[in-house]
Image: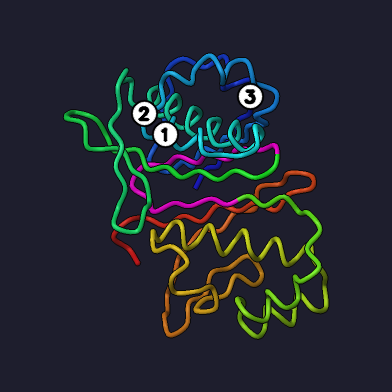
Amino acid sequence: MEIKRYGEKEFLSADKLYIRENEIHIWCIRWPEMTDFLKNHEYILSGQELEQAGRFRFPEDRMRYIAGKVVVRILLKRYLDMETIDFSVNELGKPYHKKIAGKRTVDFNISHSGEFILAVFAVGMDIGVDVQEMAECPDYREIAENFYTAEEAEDVKNEGPDLFFQYWAAKEAYVKALGIGLGRGMDFFSVRNEKIAEKDKKDQDWFLYPVRIKGYAAYVAAHEKGDR
């Protein structure tokens, strides 16, 4: 597995993009650095997305939402070499692009928190990403006890809030890769030692990768499709 990481510079300068089957591309975008660009490209959003953007009370939340949508749409257009891409969601809300004749399906996922948008792309993989700004969270121990495995909750109790956020980002990345949402909770699997271990399952070969961003916890979870 080869990981390639890109930022705002590559985003603003890239034209066509290509991704190999053994690669994961991580786009780590600090969206406040591209506010003018994002505003100039709001037009590529769907009417439903623009309506949703208008519901945000605070301008920063609105721009963060718009940034995520714009980044994904533009990058997929470059990967697929298409001007128009139709999106849909599965029964649990995970987005995907509709099949295009003569084109590979590019799997993707997105997360945003604070000043960062993280978008990940792969081919033939279940993939998920999550980023969490490590803001003050007085109740982190109680949350860990309610949502994590007993061992993870004990780790957080001993290590502190940074590990709480790291576990949370890793867990969200996994459930997003599965496409199941948080309905099953987060305690049916462990992410200790950066390894995914689901209860009562053996021979799991999930890839869990930390994305280093100062002041944030972020993880990518990936697995070859049809092999879980």
Residue type indicated by callout 2: Ser
Q: Would residue 80 appear left or right of 187 to someone viewing this image?
A: left
Residue type indicated by callout 3: Glu
**Are the residues tagged 2 and 1 within 8 Å (C-beta)?**
yes
| Cα distance between the residues tagged 2 and 1 | 5 Å
Give yes or no for residue 15 being in the magenta stretch. no
> Which residue is at 78% across, 54% downward?
135
Q: Nearer the viewer, residue 120 or 136?
A: 136
Circle 3 SS class = helix
Q: Which segment did they paint magenta?
A: 115-130
| Image position of 16 with respect to 104: above or below | above
Q: Residues within 10 Å of mark 1 (few under 14, many from 20)?
A: some
Q: Would residue 89 appear left or right of 122 to someone viewing this image?
A: left
Circle 1 SS class = helix
Label number found at residue 49: 1
- Picture quadrant of residue 60: top right
Q: Quadrant of the C terminus?
A: bottom left
Q: Point out residue 111 in the picture as x, y percentages from the top left corner.
A: 55, 45
Residue type indicated by callout 1: Glu
Q: Residues within 10 Å of mark 2 (few under 14, many from 20)?
A: few
Label number found at residue 158: none
Label number found at residue 46: 2
Magenta portion: prevailing SS class = strand
The residue that disc 3 covers is 8
> Which residue is at 60% across, 70% downward?
191
> Which residue is at 16% across, 30% downward?
101
| Cα distance between the residues tagged 2 and 3 | 23 Å
